[in-house]
Amino acid sequence: MDEITEAVLQAFDALRENGAWVPGLWRLEVANVLQMNVNRRRHRATFRDAALAEFALLPIHLDGDTDRRAGGETLRLAERHDLNVYDAAYLELALRRKIALAALDRQLRAAAASEGVQLLGA
């Protein structure tokens, strides 16, 4: 949420227009980032709550298979690309659903590129 770039804005435009698939843990990750920023006094709780309300309005679809794949292909992707399992879950989802990946993390973007996954903002 700190890195508002042209690529991020393009990804949000694509999200609003086409929707997005995310791993089942996505809401937890978003809430955690927002709460950490409240704890660090970078944002107020009112900003966190407003952001969560805005995200709830977006056409975001939670993937119900994320957890079932954690010990299989997701773990193998994490190991192969030296990713944490959370990031590998996004890569596994993009591969399985044959969808583009929106990510800022360089290591995750490199792993996606090596797996042939299209990257948003590339």
Image (cartoon, rainbow, N blue to C red):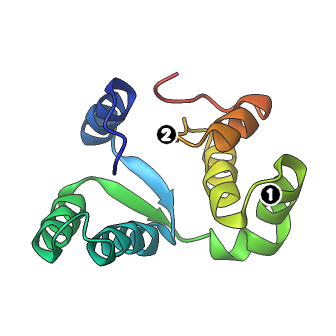
Badge 2 element: loop
The number of callouts visible is 2
Specify the farthest residue to the front: 41
Query: Which quarter of the picture shows residue 31?
Result: bottom left
Instruction: Estimate the x, y position of residue 50 in percent, counting from the top left.
Output: 12, 66
Instruction: Estimate the x, y position of residue 85 in percent, counting from the top left.
Output: 72, 65
- Identified by mark 1, the residue type is Ala
Instruction: Estimate the x, y position of residue 82 in percent, counting from the top left.
Output: 83, 52
Q: Is residue 111 left or right of residue 108?
A: right
Instruction: Tell me which residue sits at (64%, 57%) in the image.
Output: 87
Earlier-in-chain disc, 1 versus 2: 1
Query: Which quarter of the picture shows residue 60?
Result: bottom left
Specify the farthest residue to the top: 122
Instruction: Tell me which residue sits at (62%, 53%) in the image.
Output: 93
Q: Nearer the viewer, residue 4 or 64?
A: 4
Q: Nearer the viewer, residue 24 or 114?
A: 114
Establish if 35 lies above or below 91.
below
Instruction: Estimate the x, y position of residue 18 in percent, counting from the top left.
Output: 33, 37
- Identified by mark 2, the residue type is Ala
Badge 1 element: helix
Instruction: Tell me which residue sits at (40%, 48%) in the image.
Output: 20
The residue where tag 2 is placed is 102
Instruction: Tell me which residue sits at (31%, 78%) in the image.
Output: 39
Q: Where residue 78 is drawn, which disc sits there?
A: 1
Q: CA distance from mark 1 to mark 2?
A: 17 Å
Give yes or no for contact between labels 1 and 2 (Cβ–Cβ under 8 Å).
no
Query: Which quarter of the picture shows residue 7?
Result: top left
Establish if 45 lies above or below 121.
below
